[in-house]
Every structure is written in structure tokens, then in C-alpha cells.
Amino acid sequence: MLVLSRKKDESIYINGDIRVVVVDVRGDKVQLGIEAPSDVSVFRSEVLEKIRREREASNSVLSLELARDGAVFQKEEPAPEPEKRRPRHRSER
């Protein structure tokens, strides 16, 4: 983890196109402003964790529903090729 010290109105850049600015500091709280391209998602960690938990729960429910309906398909593994028998004696060559 990279740890940087910044004062109010100072900023850092991530990957050259994401700017993080210290907007205000009040007591033990820091307000950050984030400028990022529209295709970059920015979430608070607790929001992202909630999204992940909801996705996992919905995937579990979907898996259970598909299994119950008999719609679960497992990828078939190809049958192993028979091993070629190596001759043991010169007479078998």
C-alpha cells in the first residue's frame, strides 16, 4: 500500500487519468473528490462489499433454481486416449 500525505486542495493521480483531491479535512474526517473517466466505477468499500454479497447470494439462488429445474449442465471431460503399449522385447517390435 502506498501511503501519501496531502493537504487540503492537494491531489494525486492514479494511472494518469484518475485524480483524487483532498477537498476538506475536519477532525478525523477527510473529504475526497474523485475525477475519473465515465467507464471507471468508484465505490466506497462498504458499498462494494454489499454489492458483492448481493451478487453472491443471487448467484447461489440462481444455481439452486437451475439445479432444481434440472437445467444444470456439467462440462463433459474428453475421454482419455488409450495409452500406446510399448513393446517389451525386440521380437514385439
Image (spheres, rainbow, N blue to C red):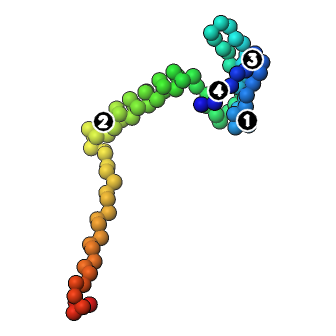
Residue matched to label 1: 17
Residue 58: name its quadrant. Answer: top left
- Tally of numbered tags: 4
Q: Are marks 1 and 4 in contact (CB under 8 Å)?
A: no
Label 1 environment density (alpha carbons within 10 Å; few <14, some 14–19, many ≥20): few
Q: Nearer the viewer, mark 1 or mark 4?
A: 4
Q: Earlier in the sequence, mark 2 or mark 3?
A: 3
The residue to which callout 3 is attached is 7
What kind of residue is marked 3?
A: Lys
Q: Which mark is residue 64?
A: 2
Percent x, y for residue 66?
32, 40
**Residue 70 x/y as whole percent:** 27, 44
Name which of mark 1 and mark 2 comes first in the sequence. Answer: 1
Q: CA distance from mark 2 to mark 3?
A: 51 Å
Between marks 1 and 2 in the image, the one whose residue lies nearer the viewer = 1
Q: Nearer the viewer, residue 12 or 4?
A: 4
Q: Quadrant of residue 41?
A: top right
Q: Who comes first in sequence, dot 4 or dot 2? A: 4
Q: Tell me the quarter of the picture where residue 6 sits.
A: top right
Residue where numbered disc 4 is placed: 3
Give the alpha-carbon distance from disc 1 to disc 2, as whole Å: 42 Å
Q: State the CA–CA distance, disc 1 to disc 4.
A: 19 Å
**In front of the other: label 3 or label 1?**
3
Discs 4, 2 touching: Cβ within 8 Å: no
Residue closest to the eye, 45 or 26: 26
Q: Nearer the viewer, mark 4 or mark 2?
A: 4
Q: For the C terminus, which image quadrant?
A: bottom left
Residue furthest right as drawn = 9
Residue at 75% in and 17% down: 7
Query: As shown in the figure, which amino acid type bears the numbered disc 2?
Result: Leu
